[in-house]
Image (cartoon, rainbow, N blue to C red):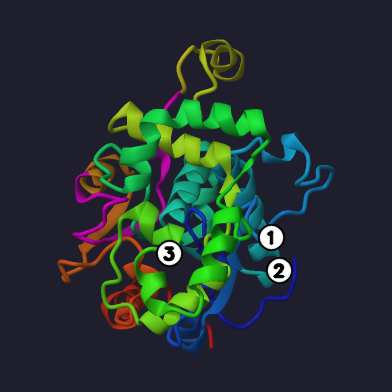
Amino acid sequence: MAPKVSGQPVFLQHGLMNSDNVWLLLPDALAFTLADAGYDVWLGNARGNTYSRRHVSLDPSQEDYWNFSFDEMGNYDIPAVINFVLTKTGSEKMSYVGHSMGCTMFFICMSLHPELNEKIDVMIALAPAVSMAKSTAPLMVNQAPFALQIKYVFDLIGVRAYQPVDSFWNNLRKRYCEPNLFLRYSLCQNTLFSSSGDDYHSLDLNLLPIIDGHNPAGTSVNTAVHYAQNYMAGQTFQRFDFGVEENQLRYGQTTPPTYDLSKITSDVFIFWGQSDKVSAPTDIAWLETKLGNLRNSIMIEDPLWNHFSFLFSADAKRVVYDKLIPFLPQPIL
């Protein structure tokens, strides 16, 4: 076993179309806040984003590379990350903080690999994206009903990456809107905000060019489709739907099975916003009834707090970060 390093390990996992940059953009961002408090901070990048495109045998130019959704991230990537961090630090346990899809990945991991619960001290879920049934985010309401048709067109023209940072629209937006904060705020709104329906509540608008420089960071088309499937399926949390024949081959049944959230026995604390259109309060309430060991569900008192307020609000440290730290094990100093 590797020699134990100083500091209690805490792993941060970003959400859909983001990268690890979201934990670093604010002067008092969560990664800095935890490091200042004495924690050993680790940052994850979901497969397929700007900083996570390497593969042992495949290249991003190949179609097979993009044949994944958040199912593979939770089933394969998070177990690998947990074991890597614990091996490198010599620790027996680590803490996990996820935002949005970062929570999706964790819950899948613990559902399919329940033995890993023993390696987690505590899980902090910020705006967890699980059931999407009551989401009013434009990405869900406007695109999810047509997900199969959109995927068909993307397959036809060879598009496998969804919203990479260097996409045509993002490059166009940066080229013509970059000097003008008003255009960034309105007509040239970043995809993160236009797809989530978030406004810029308590966001320093001077941060927009920095956010634009790194986001959206991309994912696979299948990942977006998987969320669309869950939205259309109602209040549930299910595996990727490949169609009747392939479902039978992969799952032994014609419909995709649901993830068993009762198998998540590690301590879970949820933080959620009243104005979150992605992770709607009704869906959070559903999740609360399914988790195997929910310790507390904390509603952010600010009534305008939305999905990306957890990452980009100037008040995030005071409203969220300072309140989640007491739930973590004390750092080893």
Depth check: give the residue in front, 332 or 196.
Answer: 196
The stretch drawn in magenta includes residue 245: no
Question: 10 Å neighbourhood of mark 2: few (<14), some, or many (≥20)?
Answer: few
In the picture, the disc for residue 84 is 1
State the residue position of label 2. 88
Cα separation, mark 1 vs mark 2, equals 6 Å
Say which label, 3 or 1, has the lower sequence index: 1
- The image shows residue 263 at horizontal and vertical percentages of 41, 39
Looking at the picture, does residue 323 appear above or below residue 266? below
In the picture, the disc for residue 188 is 3
Cα separation, mark 3 vs mark 1, equals 40 Å
- The image shows residue 14 at horizontal and vertical percentages of 50, 61
Q: Secondary structure at mark 2?
A: helix
Question: 10 Å neighbourhood of mark 3: few (<14), some, or many (≥20)?
Answer: many
The quadrant of the rendering that contains the N terminus is: bottom right
Whether pointer 1 and pointer 2 mark residues with C-beta atoms closer than 8 Å, the reply is yes
The quadrant of the rendering that contains the C terminus is: bottom right
